[in-house]
Amino acid sequence: MYSVIVVPPSCGNVSEQLRISAGERIEFGRACPGDPYARGSGSGDSRSGRLHSGGSRSGASLSGSGGLAIAHAGVPRVAGEITAHRTFWLLSNLSEDQTYVVENPEGAGEHIKVAPGRVDAPVPFEMSRVTLPAAGDLLSFDVWAPRHAFRSVERQGLEGAGTVPAFALDRTKRYFAVLAALCERRLRGEPRAPLPAVEEIVERLRPSWPKVSRSAVYWNIDYLAVKLRLRPGPDTAEPGRRTHGKKESLASLALRFDLVREDDLVVLAPAPSGTER
Amino acid sequence: MTGRPYAVPVPKGYRIGPWEVREPVASGAFATVYEGVRAASAGAGRTSDAGGLPRRTALKFLPTGTRTPRQLHHLRDLAEREVQLLRRLRSPRLVRMYDTLTVDDPDHPELDGATVLVLERAEGSLDAVLARTPRPEAGPALLAQICEGLHQLHHAGWVHGDLKPANVLLMADGSARLADFNMAAELEGTHAYSPAFSTPDYTPPELLWPEVDERGTRIRPSADVWAFGVLAHLVLTGAFPLPGGTSEARCDAATRYARGREELRLSPGLSEAWQDVLRDCLAPTHAERPTDTAALLRRVEGAAGTSRSARLPRLRPRRWRRPARAAVVAAAVVGVTSLAYTSPWEPDPTTTAPPTCERPVVYEDADGRGYMAGHSGTWDFTVQRGDGGSQVRELQCLLRHLHGIEEVGEVDGDFGPLTQGAVVVFQKRAGLDADGVVGPATWRALREPASG
């Protein structure tokens, strides 16, 4: 039932993500109340400060004592607060004099600034990177709002409460391009075609997304699994089959429920000649 | 009705099997329903039964063709679910399907291959009634019928998956039927797999952002029980049980309620019996909701019985029979190239013409014998100025066409000053208290033959 996921940086494990649902809040800062990891040590990590998630984990209630500890001397003891609200989230900047920046990593520089003391600033991005300046370093962590809702324009004018898909994908996002690339062969009339390997997806996406990498594709596949609340299949227990099983489940789900259709393949660059159609 | 987008535009006068397409009746996300009239050239006679089919039906078009503009193949799944359910289940509270057809018309590529369900023609949906008359007086009785439909469905091992006012149809006799089974799923153990579609305002909190796999969302019968709770609150109070001005806000409130962060505040105007029923139906977790729909039905009937309007009497006695598990219906709907015309149902035993507003007919039911005008079979449903609906329509028909009181004006289903005046005239003539309120005594007099 959660609607917002806070991802500490270099977080390799889903259990380190903090999940909050509407109305719940997470504090972040050098010392979060009740957080055993909060120690004011230096920043060895070049990308960001070391962050630990405190409090209860994986979607459990985090109100009260839980929080995100940012172990950097330049971060205020209580630096700010994240509140889940409906399908988006609010950021409170509790620092004395630092402006926080919330950036849309896919938005070509699109960002919002949250001035010191500002309470409950709404963040409209589905995926965000929160950056805090701290004594010359820039520290950042990610926040996802995977439940962003979209309403079909086709229903305009119809009366009554509409029956809508349980999932809405943003067709302008990179995850949608990844999904389209994943399903392309099957959508082009080969329903039994094998799924492309991650390397092939990278190649397919490169013309429209020059900086695409294997890890970016993996990241988007993982994110899609979170967003679509994919129930892990039985074969995902084996480590080697994990990504393959996820790709397979994503593709069959997307095709079965028409989350991606042949018309949507326009998000990919035109198919190079010689590609099987 | 013009200017509205229809999921499946079908030209007026289009012929499909013995049916001629008339006006569109309703359109949803996936399908469009048109009125169908049996074409004059089809069948032996106009009034006699051609395989037990009525003259007027509802034709539900689902764009399942391969050349429909968007190749939505999940539509085939949605169509198949409805066809499967309606072929296998026939219960008094579920809309009746007479036939399924497949359009074979290469000249209309957007229609070619479409699945057409030939359904019982309803007068309208509960949604339309609520839009005009929030808190209809017949509400409690309708809820009992809706709950009965749910019970019949669950008892047969199916989950509706999309129960809401737009999917409750009201028949000419004022009774309710469940319809639109595109999300319906047959139970496999404790769960059923529903295509991942829902109507947020009627979706239980645990399914607002459901887990999903290739087979869809797992839903339990308790999802329908939650939807019934929402629907009942809306019918009885005119408002949704959870606060919020938009569907998104109400879903948010539902989430907070399920997390124990907000309490359920039912409308204080509800009777204690209804409060109990609704609180149970709207329990925050699926395990707390009543799934024994037979027991729930008894409680709903009890709650409905304590209010002023008793159950709606049926216009005609039940005459539903279990269909023989006919092999005739086995022909696949989708993919059949020629017109698949199957008519497995037993002939309709009603041989006399049904009553109409202009020509009320004497019928006998459990409550008595009298003239019926086809809109409501009530004998005791009190209506007065300001009311509306099928009972008022019935009243207006009887006043105008049986008793010849022209002052009633147009038969519009609204109890306004003209209707009140006509009622007073009638009551004076019949020697009743001329108070303008139509209660049991007035109904009895209305259903008697016109004097002189």
Image (cartoon, rainbow, N blue to C red):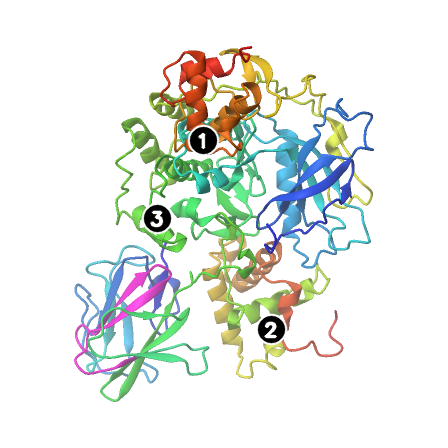
- Look at the picture and state if A100 lies above or below B121: below
Q: Which residue is mark 1?
A: B418
Q: Are marks 3 and 1 on the same chain?
A: yes
Is residue B330 left or right of B83 when viewed as pictured?
right
Q: Which mark lies nearer to you, 3 or 1? A: 1
Residue count near mark 1 (Cα–Cα under 10 Å), binned few <14, some 14–19, many ≥20: some
Q: Nearer the viewer, residue A183 or B109?
A: B109
Q: Which residue is mark 2?
A: A267
Q: Nearer the viewer, residue B101 or A52?
A: B101
Is residue B396 left or right of A44 when viewed as pictured?
right
Q: At x 19% / y 60%, what residue is drawn?
A: A65
Examine the rendering and report whether any part of residue B230 can be seen. yes
Tag 2 secondary structure: helix
Percent position (x, y) of residue B6? 62, 52
Based on the displayed image, in which of its 4 quarters is residue B14 positioned?
Answer: top right
Identify the residue at the far bottom of this view: A136
Magenta stretch: give its range. Answer: A76-100
Percent position (x, y) of residue A197? 61, 70
Q: Which mark lies nearer to you, 2 or 1? A: 1
Instruction: Residue B254: give its label.
Output: 3
Q: Are marks 3 and 2 on the same chain?
A: no
Alpha carbons under labels 3 and 2: distance apart: 36 Å
Tag 3 secondary structure: helix
**Can residue B176 be found in the magenta stretch?**
no
